[in-house]
Image (spheres, grey):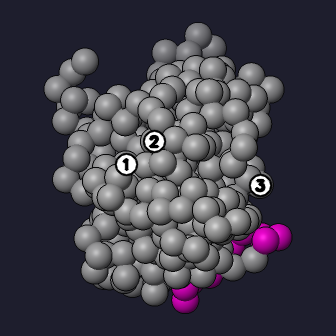
């Protein structure tokens, strides 16, 4: 798996191409056009940096959305 | 609409609202019902939860924020499900990023899964961190007047004591505590949680609360859209009754018709 990197995505292992950006991750997850926020290793990565932010092995990534709630 | 009604707005963090009913978006059958109920409620502030995106699920499904556009409604992200100050703060920061810098949040830090009572120590700690970080915090709390004042002093923009446990529908269990909180408050006080039916919302407003936040009372009604309308009317009715000022309670009767001129 040399050409892949393994991250933890929303609590589960997830594989991506090496040096994938957060924008690529969002595309992989078909999130285009929806509202979401991403945190990497407990730090929020602003949307403006998603294109340039490259993921590394063992990054812990959270992708969240708004859902119904009180 | 007359002048006095127009002037009676709820002001939270500098923004005016015509409706004093705030509603949640959970527990509805589907997004269409959510949208219809919220429309019928007349609410302008609606709460949402922040949760992990389901990986590998169909993302073509409509998103909540497509149905409830942030242009039309003031979206109030909550920290429901958080049991520590740290998790609550983290959730608020994610919500702010999700909503393009929108910084109005509903803070709730829970202490126990059975009662969903707030953990006050954690709530105070999270409120302080969030206020320092520039958030405008509407905070869910117990009906303890001392804690309510402390949350106000920390800088929360609204304090929201429970009427009864979340989702219980038991009504306003301790109206005297709500009154004590209201007496000391200089920020809006909203009852958050516990309302079961329209009269409960009216009771909260008749006590002088600035608003009511509810979810289950509408979503779990047999006809949610109809109940949403009832709550809209109930909150307005209670507000107007509070402004009108109720008559004093008396132990004995006082005839409404004149005594003079009786035929016998």
Q: Nearer the viewer, residue B153 or B249?
A: B153
Element carrying mark 1: loop
Between B201 and B168, the one lying in front of the other is: B168
Res A31 seen here: yes
Overall secondary structure of the magenta section: loop
Quadrant of the rendering where the N terminus of chain B is positioned: top left
Please give the chain letter of the residue carrying mark 1.
B
Viewer-closest of B148 and A32: A32
Q: Residue B185 occupies which quadrant of the picture?
A: bottom left
Q: Which residue is mark 2?
A: A35
Q: Kindly report the distance in space between the C-alpha atoms of the residues bearing marks 3 and 2.
A: 32 Å
Residue at 56% x, 66% y is: A61
Which disc number belongs to residue B99?
1
| Residue drawn at 19 percent across, 53 percent down | B14
Q: Secondary structure at mark 3?
A: loop
Q: Disc 2 to disc 1, how far (Cα)?
A: 8 Å
3 or 1: tag closer to the N-terminus: 1
In the image, residue A7 lies in the stretch drawn in magenta? no
Magenta region, residue range: B113-123
Splitting the image into 4 quarters, where does residue B138 fall?
bottom left
Residue corresponding to mark 3: B168
Tell which tag, 3 or 1, sits nearer the viewer: 1
């Amino acid at each position: 798996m040399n050409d892949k990197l393994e991250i933890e995505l929303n609590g589960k292992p997830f594989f991506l191409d090496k040096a994938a950006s957060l924008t690529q991750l969002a595309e992989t997850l078909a999130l285009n056009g929806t509202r979401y926020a991403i945190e990497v290793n407990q730090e929020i990565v602003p949307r403006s940096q998603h294109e340039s932010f490259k993921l590394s092995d063992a990054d812990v990534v959270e992708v969240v959305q708004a859902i119904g709630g009180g | 609409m007359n002048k006095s009604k127009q002037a009676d707005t709820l002001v939270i963090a500098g923004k005016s609202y015509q409706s004093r009913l705030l509603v949640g978006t959970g527990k509805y059958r589907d997004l269409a019902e959510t949208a219809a109920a919220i429309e019928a409620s007349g609410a302008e502030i609606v709460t949402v939860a922040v949760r992990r995106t389901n990986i590998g699920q169909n993302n073509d499904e409509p998103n909540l924020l497509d149905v409830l556009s942030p242009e039309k409604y003031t979206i109030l992200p909550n920290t429901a499900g958080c049991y520590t100050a740290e998790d609550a703060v983290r959730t608020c920061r994610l919500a702010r990023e999700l909503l393009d810098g929108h910084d109005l949040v509903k803070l709730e830090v829970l202490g126990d899964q059975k009662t969903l009572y707030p953990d006050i120590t954690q709530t105070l700690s999270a409120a302080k961190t969030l206020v320092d970080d520039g958030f405008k915090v509407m905070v869910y709390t117990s009906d303890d007047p001392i804690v309510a004042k402390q949350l106000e002093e920390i800088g929360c923009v609204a304090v929201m004591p429970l009427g009864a446990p979340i989702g219980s529908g038991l009504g306003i269990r301790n109206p005297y505590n709500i009154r004590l909180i209201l007496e000391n408050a200089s920020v809006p006080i909203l009852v958050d949680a516990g309302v079961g039916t329209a009269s409960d919302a009216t009771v909260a407003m008749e006590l002088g609360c600035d608003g009511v936040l509810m979810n289950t009372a509408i979503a779990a009604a047999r006809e949610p859209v109809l109940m949403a309308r009832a709550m809209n009317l109930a909150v307005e009715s209670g507000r107007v009754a509070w402004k009108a000022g109720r008559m004093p309670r008396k132990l004995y009767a006082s005839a409404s018709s004149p005594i003079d001129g009786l035929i016998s």
